[in-house]
Amino acid sequence: MAQNNIPISEIYWSLVDKADRKFSRVRDLPHYGRARYDSYFHKVFKIYTQLWKFQQENRQKLVEAGLKRWEIGEIASRIAQLYYGQYLRTSEASYLSESYIFYEAILSREYFKDGSSSQDLNLANKQLRCLARFLIVCLVLNRRDMVFQLVDHLKVLVDECKRNFQEADFRDWKQVVQEIVRYLKVDTAFMNIRPLRYSLVLDSNPDTLQYPFSFDAKRGLRLRDAILSSYHHNEVKFTELTLDTFRMLQCLEWEPSGLFYQSNKASSGNGSTIAQSGAPGPNRNNHSQDLIDPTLPPNPRKAILYRPAVTHFIAVLATICEELPSDGVLLIYLSASGKGGQVGQLPSSSGTYMKTTESIVGNIQSHDMTSDVHNTSPSSFRNDSPTYSSRGNPRNNSGCLWMGSRGNGGINCLYPSDLIPFTRRPLFLIINSDCSQAFKAGYTWGRTGRTCCDTPFSEPSLSSCWRFC
């Protein structure tokens, strides 16, 4: 009886306060580690599901009590952030799809456009941050039509804010606009060629691929985790997603049923949509059907590290190796400028010499993945005539990757020998650098008696994924 006498608005704001506290706890948690923080996310998803349903059921009373539309939009934005964060931790496409649905609802219903954003600086920044986060989700989903729409919207909004407020308050947002424009300009050449993701239309069925055996020869190895890291000066990026790590991320996502090449007429023509619980509105599009295919394997978990310190990179690598399943393979992609040492060109099995990263990695795509930014970087240079030597201190005789300022010397250098402790687990290395030959496995720094993972991986069938709301 006492609870029935509590005003609806007080219950609502109590839920908002509780949700804010739980959100602040999980917002800055690292995006790596298997099931380490699942309990936190179960709790925060539960409270936000409760909050969202409560405001839906009592919308009219809450509006009469003073609830603003932008406050509803902020809740939806938090839920979208949680879904995207969970995608970064699990690489499950369903979470990415849910994030897209909430962000699209915020944009289409104009939650942040209630007339006060032109006078409220804090509200204007909330709207800009929401658009920037939605841009990231659309980039990962390859929804380029929405990306260009959002870029135009972002430009207009930034110009409007510069007119209504002090221009100095939006210098950072002007730089964000310049970043995404530059990003799309460089990446436009790859559009409509073929998907970077695995495609059932163009690629072989996973069941027909050969796979390396584990050391006990009882079961095959499977690509379970990946670390994607980049460290260059003035590299092409949007927020903390660089162009090279973005393309590698796309290569590690399964193309859903070859939808990249399906014609529009192949889709259902009834025009109906499926409403699910937790949606921001009744006309929720079923984007999950575009992404989820039960016949495809699960995506490997991916840890994206933007300009990490060497110590941070090694800490993340140690955590992932510790939690890697017994049949798992870890892929490491490192893109950084190199420091050449006394390491010569290493011969390949065919008798030729491995001169570039593309020779080791293979033709991931038909165009050069490196941009002019890498070549003009002040920290990038080549060793023109090195000679191979296996004697002496390996840190003096081998190349390394620069992952920091050069003034601090070796503390910011990642050497091949730094990876030796982690070769106890199966590793697949991709080094995008001018000294990538120093990391060639099987020479002075690698462990002996290890199976080389140079054949395609076998993937298990997709298990049914659980959902929060």
Image (spheres, rainbow, N blue to C red):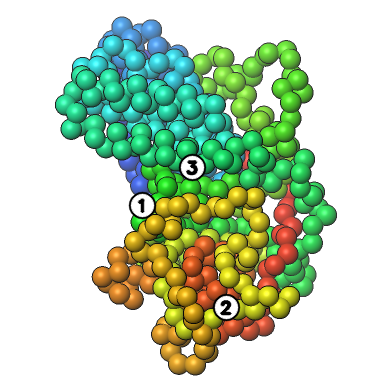
Circles 1 and 3 in contact, beta carbons < 8 Å? no
Q: Secondary structure at mark 2?
A: loop
Quadrant of the image occupied by residue 134? top left
Where is mark 3, residue-wise? 186
What quarter of the picture does the N terminus occupy? Answer: top left
Residue at the farthest front position:
384
Gap in Å between the C-alphas at discs 2 and 1? 28 Å
Residue type for callout 1: Asn
Q: Position of residue 29 (x, y in %)?
A: 39, 49
Above-or-below relation of 43 to 315: above
Which residue is at a point 64% across and 75% down the rendered structure image? 353
Q: Position of residue 105 (x, y in %)?
A: 48, 20
73 sits left or right of 356 in the view:
left
Gap in Å between the C-alphas at discs 1 and 3? 14 Å
Please tell me which of labels 2 and 3 falls first in the chain. 3
Residue at the farthest right position:
208
Circles 2 and 1 in contact, beta carbons < 8 Å? no
Where is mark 2, residue-wise? 345
Residue type for callout 2: Gln
Quadrant of the image occupied by residue 359? bottom right
Above-or-below relation of 119 to 336: above
Where is mark 1, residue-wise? 234
204 sits left or right of 243 in the view:
right
Q: Secondary structure at mark 3?
A: helix
What quarter of the picture does the C terminus occupy? Answer: top right
